[in-house]
Every structure is written in structure tokens, then in C-alpha cells.
Image (spheres, rainbow, N blue to C red):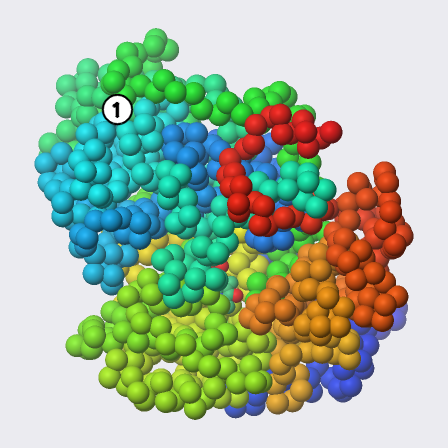
Amino acid sequence: MTLPGSYEPYDFANRRHIGPSPEEMTEMLRVLGVQSLDALIAETVPQAIRQAEPLDFGKPLSERGGLDHLRETANKNRVLTSLIGQGYHGTILPPVIQRNILESPAWYTAYTPYQPEISQGRLEALLNFQTLVSDLTGLDVANASLLDEATAAAEAMALAHRVTKSKATAFFVDAECLPQTIAVVKTRGEPLGWDVIVGDPFKDLDPERVFGALFQYPGVSGAFHDFSEVIRRLHAAKALAIVAADPLALTLLKPPGEMGADIAVGSMQRFGMPMGYGGPHAAYIAVKDIYKRSLPGRIVGVSIDARKNRAYRLSLQTREQHIRRESSTSNICTAQVLPAVIASMYAVFHGPKGLKAIAERVHRKAARLAEGLASLGFDIRPQAFFDTITVGVGPYQGLIMKNAVDYGVNLRKVGTDRIGITVDERTRPATLEAVWRAFGGYDLVYRDAYPEYRLPKALIRHSAYLTHPVFHMNRAESEMTRYMRRLADRDLALDRAMIPLGSCTMKLNATAEMLAITWPEFAEIHPFVPADQARGYAELIADLCDKLCRITGYDAFSMQPNSGAQGEYAGLLTIRAYHKSRGEGHRNVCLIPASAHGTNPASASMCGMKVLVVATDANGNIDLDDFRSKAEANAGALAAAMITYPSTHGVFEETVTDICAITHANGGQVYLDGANLNALVGLARPGDVGADVGHINLHKTFCIPHGGGGPGMGPIGVKQHLAPFLPGHPETGGNAMTVSAAPYGSASILPISWSYCLMMGGAGLTQATRVAILNANYIATRLESTYGVLYKGRGGRVAHECIVDTRPLLERAGVTVDDVAKRLIDCGFHPPTMSWPVAGTLMIEPTESETKAELDRFCDAMLAIYDEAQAIAEGRADKQNNALKGAPHTVEDLIGDWNRPYSREAACFPAGAFRVDKYWPPVNRVDNVYGDRNLVCSCPPMESYVKAAE
Ligand SMILES: *Cc1c(COP(=O)(O)O)cnc(C)c1O
């Protein structure tokens, strides 16, 4: 039977990810004055770089087909109970947090909280996180998360070097540190000429020889010590002490701060995040007050708004790489906000008593386990432990490990004759019985009697923690649900409005792509399980790498870097290792255009490279003459050039192939920052253009949500000649160079990018790129005659983003770029990227996901703001007291006294703002200077809450 009427093929995949309907696209093309999308792309993307073959992955999968395929792949992973420890533990994520944070787009689609007025919710959650960390570690100031424990340790080493008065160039690492931490610290120290000495802190540490030392507490074998005396000796030699500590153990044990440690680092994974085959998890770093200005990453602080109400914001931003560039000691940009929020909520949910009870339960299980094994005659070490023991097994290591797997448990191999066991929150009596059986204890049964504590008396914690009321709220789930909802409602995320942040590619994170990340088959896999338990992951990673190779024209990928900036660092290390292998290890000059993202120069200096800045011309292009002359003048020492394509100015530079050729001719390698890949997929390939290596931000182009500032993934692709130099890992082999704690970075979010590729297919991905370019050009066209668009390609078109100029408004009306950005909040938008890469401008990237209606709402808002500025310029509005300077407006402005020359209506409901679904920022404009002068980085006392509420 045939249906009446004509049958029109309907493309579900494209409709999910692509905002404008076919009719809307026709209308938009008409506004642009082009015949077709093909014609627009031909005007935009230089013919010389267009890829020869269309991207083709075969037929795209439907939503159901994609989920079925993910299910099949997940089933190839085997979920056993992993008691491997080594920095990763089984956890129980309270369902109320899983559903309302991890699975809630209000939380996971938010951007980094650079605009504090629309970020108060996640800023409060992060402040809770910082309070949690500084309380547990006994140190003064904590940041809002780092990428993982190993990189946090490396950041701590760099911090120590920056602030130490010691002249030493060596760094000491406790042999009890996690193997992956040791590998990452060694990798980080090597290019900077820091000798990393690994040994026993009580025997091998000579404080005079080192600028700092790192200890693990408890150590990987389960042992722990009071480091107070060693720390005193370090301080006498002007060296710093860093303790990598397990935060759950710290609920029972004397914290690093009380031992005199300067810095503490660690992983908050145990606070509810699943192991996820290695990540994402929030790492923490905390320091003594005197070092707070050297702390890497982001720090949430407390300030006030225009009404002098309390308001949160990111503080001390001048420390960050986007300001300090090549003199920065850290390149941290995207961190782990969502996992940090989850850890903070886990602490709010359990409170100090609950956390302590969990730690005691874990300890009790470990003590029971040890008792049972001792009763079987095994040698148990250490005598005092928290959750980890090792068992002497003589020649039976292999046999017992295999038995354990047969009983469903993974244990850790230690040397040739011992086995390590780490218990956790999930460990049940049956788990212990399975372990005993693996060791031959068939008759042992778990008894609920309380075993003797095995913690040393001298190290028991007496100090209080989490005394702030937020950790003592009523634990009814209704309270918890409403607290999370309240915070989410304060924020503006993608679930409410377009986030047109240039360079950040805030595109749709489709629900179907998100579903798999909490499936136990992906979430509950320890990163160091035997390969035959992670076949599903292996298949997923291999296929995603293959697809990324076909998209980019690179030949191999490493999934290790867990952010874009980590990718830059890993890629430059790869280049360095390549030069070394050819006897050209002296090459250390890196050319970087002035317009580059701040992480580029920061990453280069982390690799010990000397950064030479290349000028950009009036059109925003790399100044080819300057580039050539700097490359030629440094031909003997040129290591690399770092370029961004299309450029950070949002333009396809025609000279990109020349730049690559000049770099190669002078002995350098080309690093291509792939943050802008959303303008290339399916149209052009970095590998064909001449790049040798580059990262891709899977959290930009490939749909991993931004999480409010992480997690992310920044895998790097390389051409064949660099493939042998990609990072390795102590657990999986390969190169000695290691950049992340886990072999595949934050592996558990890879299903998101993979399902995006599967459900879009090659043609769908290409269409997404084309529409991203269409949407950007539509905005550029609509705003051109007012604001003006700063840079354009030869065809008069922009790429996937455009920079509009607000500087004339400053001249004519005293209106700053800040005023425009904050006024956009009144209109119901997240402001675009501000003053980067050009001061006084806004960089707008709509992505393919936004509909014409949303683009028009945004353009209408921008044009109305322009008119408001015009009114000031023409004297129709007051220069100081106007809606732009007063923005953003809150409910407070709608009630109470009003003595301004503009109406409340105009203040609160400008163009773009919804009448019913109006987004109300919870605070007025936040005072940045006040916050930095009066730095407060943990939860303020309760009286100030009362005051704020008054
Ligand atoms: C986002 C971005 C980066 C950094 O990526 P992270 O994942 O935040 O570390 C680097 N370069 C450019 C151009 C970017 O837009």
C-alpha cells in the first residue's frame, strides 16, 4: 500500500543537531545574498584547502540504532569488582545527585563561570568544593579542581619551583607515590631540566638537593607515616613539601596541613564519581595562604555586586595563562567543574558525620579482610593501614590473581610475590568472602563483629572539618533536590538559551549521546583492569580514533590528554621527542602568532620552549613576512610553529599552506590548535593542510558538554612520522612520556563523541560544519551595518564565528564591551567571548545547533543594545545612569525604590527577554576589584548569608 501524497525523506539525524529548518536556511541564504549553501561554502572556504573526498562513514545510525550499538559495545566490557586501588575506587553516587547534576542539562551544559552574574549556582557549588578541600587537607586555600591527581602533583611541583627560595634543581618523589603520578611528574620535570629523584623519604631524601618533595598519604602499598619531621627538614633547606592525600582517609587521619605541608593534592573521585575507566574525576590542590597567588587553575572567591550584596566570582584571574601567556607556569584552562560539583554535593549530602562513617566502614572492611587473610597464614603489610594492604603470596601470585578474577574480583599485582588489595565504599561482605576464597580460605565467613582499628593512634585526626552550615542541612532528599535545583536555576546554561561563545563551540549535547556514560559497563571499569575486561572500550576507542583520523587527515591519535591545553602540551612533547630522536634535541624555538589562545604559549614554555611571537596584520592574518623572517633567522633552533585554523579571528587564512611549508623548510614541525575544527569537519583536513600534530577539543566540536568548566578531552592526532613519539603509560606501555593519570584520559565520556559521529555519519557531520558557517555569516550580516565585523576572508565571509566591534560605542557613548555583555544578560543571553582575541570586541560563535529564531532573538537584542548606546551618544539617555551601565537588572530592581531616568520595563524586559520565561540573574553586576582585594575562597560564615538575605 502506498500512502497518499508524495513521500519526502526526513532526516532525523540532521534535525537533531542542526538548528535552522530547511525553510529557515533558504531565508537565511536570501539575507546573505547567495544562491545556496554550496555557494556560501565556496565563497568561504578556500578551494586550495578543500578536501578531495567527502567524509563517509557509511549510513548514519538512527537514535535507537546508535543506542543499540552502544549497548552492544558496552556489553563487551566485563564489570568485575575492582579492588585494585592505585588512585581509583568503587563509589556509590547518590541517585539524587546522579539524576539532578550528572544527568541534568542545567548543570552539564553550562560554560566556565567567567560571567559571574549568570553563574552564581555553580560558583556556590565550587566554593563548597574549595571549602571541602581546604577543610579536609588542613590548608588555607584550595582551587576549584585540576584535571587528575597526577597532573595536580606535577602542577604542585611547578608551583613549588616558582615560589621556592632554594636554588636546587632536583625534585624528590616518594617511591610510595602512585606509579602514574611518578610518570607524569617525571615527564613534566624533564624538559625544564628538573631532576626527579624517586626514593624513600626517610632514607634517601637530602633536603639540600631539592626544591621540593612529594609524598603519598597513604602510600600505594597502604602504609602511611607522619611526615612532620621530614617537612621540617625540607623547610630548613627552603624546600617545599607536597602531600598527595586520599580525601576519604583524611576524615580519619591527621591532615597534611597539620604536618606542615605547603601544598596538598589528590583526587576527589572517591566522593561519588564512578571510576569510568580513568575519568573524568576532579583533582584538588590546596596551599598555605602565602602561596595562593601562585595557585594554578581557577579559584572561586567572594565579592559583592552593585547593590553590595554578596556575589561569587572567579578571583585572581591575572594569574591565569590567558593573561600571563609564555610566562605562565601552568596551562590549565578547562578543568573538572562537573566532577567537582558532584564531589561537593556528595559532601553536602553526607555531611561530616556521614563521610566519617563511610571512611570507618571502609576501614573496618579492610581490617576484617586483613584479619581473615592473616588467619590463613599470609603475611600482611603494613601493620597500620586505612583501606589498602599487600599480601605476601610467594610463588602463587598468578594463581591467586586468577582465582580472584574467577570469583569476580580484580586485585593488584605488586612486585613478583605480593598482591595489593584496596577496599572501598562498595565493598560488601560477599566481596571479602570472594577474596578470602581466592586465597584458599573457603571456610571463612564474614562476621559483623567490630575488628580492632588498624590506624596508628598518633595519626588520628582530632580537628573538626565541614563545620559550615551548608554541610549540615537537613538530609531529607526533598531538601537536597531543592538545593541543587535552586543553584541550577541561578545559572544560564544551554538548556535555556544560546551560548554564543567564540572559540568555545557551545553546541548541542544531545540526550541520546549522554545516556551511555552512566551505564555501569562504561562507568564502573577501573582504568587498570586486564585488557579482556575492557574490550568494549578498546573497540570504541579504536573506532573513534579511526574516525578522527579520517576527519583530520592525521594518521594516529592518542586519547590521553584530558583537555585541549593538555593536548597542546602532549603534542609539543611529541615534537620534542621527534627532534631528539634525530639528534636535533637542541631545537627549542616555538613561533606563535600574537592572536593565539593563551594556552599555546603557556604549553610551549611548559615544554621548555622559547616562544617567539609573530605579528598579525591589519586583516587579522599571520604576518607572513614576519613569520618567514623569524623562521629563517631561527632555522637552526626552530622546533615548532603553533597555529590555529581557521584563525582565532574567525577567518580561513589563505596562507596556511605557506606557513606550514616555511616551518618545515626551516626544520620545524607544525602544531595546529584544533579548537576551531567545527569549521573544518568534512570540508578540509588539518593533516592535508600541512599540520604534523594537533589536538581536538572533543568538548567543543564533538558534543561533550562543557560541564561548567570541564570535563573535556583533548586527544592529539599526528602524522605517521610522529606516531612513535605519542604518550605512553606505565600500565599500558609505550613511551616513557606520560601526560595524564589514566591511559585514555577521561575515557568514560568518549561514548558521547563516538555516538555523535555514529548518529551523524560523514554527510551529517559535514552538514553541521556548513550550517555552523551559515549561522555565523547570518549573524555577521545582520550586525555588520551597526557594529561592524572585524575580520573577513577574501570572499567577504567569516568562518564559523565572527568578531563584532564595540569600541566605537566606547568612543561615542562611553559604553564598554562589559556593558554590552552584561546587558545581553538582561536580554536572556550568555554573553559572547569578550575582548579576545581583540580587546573591546565580542567574538560570536552560534554553532549549527541554533535555530534561526534564536539567532534572530540574539541579533535583535544586539541591535537594541546598539540603539541604547546610540541614544546615549545623541544625549537622549544619561551617560552614567542608563540601562547599559545598570545591567544586569535583577528582581530587586523591579521592586523597591526606582529613581533612574529609564523605566523598569526597559531595564528588565529589553529585546530578546521573555515575558514569562524571563531569566533573572540572581545578582547585579559583580565587583571584580573588591573580590581580589578582599580575597575569600571558602564558604563565608553564616552571618553573611543572613545579611545577604535581608
Ligand atoms: C578552548 C581552546 C583551547 C584550550 O582548550 P581547553 O580544553 O580549555 O584546555 C586552546 N585553544 C583555543 C583556540 C581554544 O579555543
SS at badge 1: loop
Q: Is residue 225 left or right of residue 902?
A: left
Q: Residues within 10 Å of mark 1 (few under 14, many from 20)?
A: many
Give the image quarter of residue 828: bottom right
Check disc 1 and give the amino acid type: Phe
Residue 181 drawn above or below residue 677: above
Q: Residue at x 88, y 54 (%)?
A: 901
Residue 147 visible in this rendered orientation of the protein: no
Q: Nearer the viewer, residue 332 or 89?
A: 332
| Viewer-nearest residue: 423 or 705 | 705
Where is residue 381? Give x, y as percent: 18, 26
Q: Residue at x 43, y 80 (%)?
A: 614
Image quarter (top left, top right, bottom left or bottom right) of the N terminus: bottom right
Instruction: Please name the residue that numbered disc 1 is placed on.
Output: 385
Q: Position of residue 392 (x, y in %)?
A: 15, 29
Residue 35: image x %, image y %? Answer: 76, 87
Rendered position, 481 above or below 592: above
Position of 736 relative to 380 (above/below): below
Query: Mark 1: is the Cβ under 8 angstroms from ligand 1?
Result: no
* Foreground pick, 322 / 795: 322
Q: Give the side of residue 228 with respect to residue 560, left or right.
A: left
Q: Residue at x 80, y 55 (%)?
A: 881
Number of marks: 1
Depth check, front residue: 286 or 575: 286
Residue 534 lies, in percent from the top left, at 38, 48
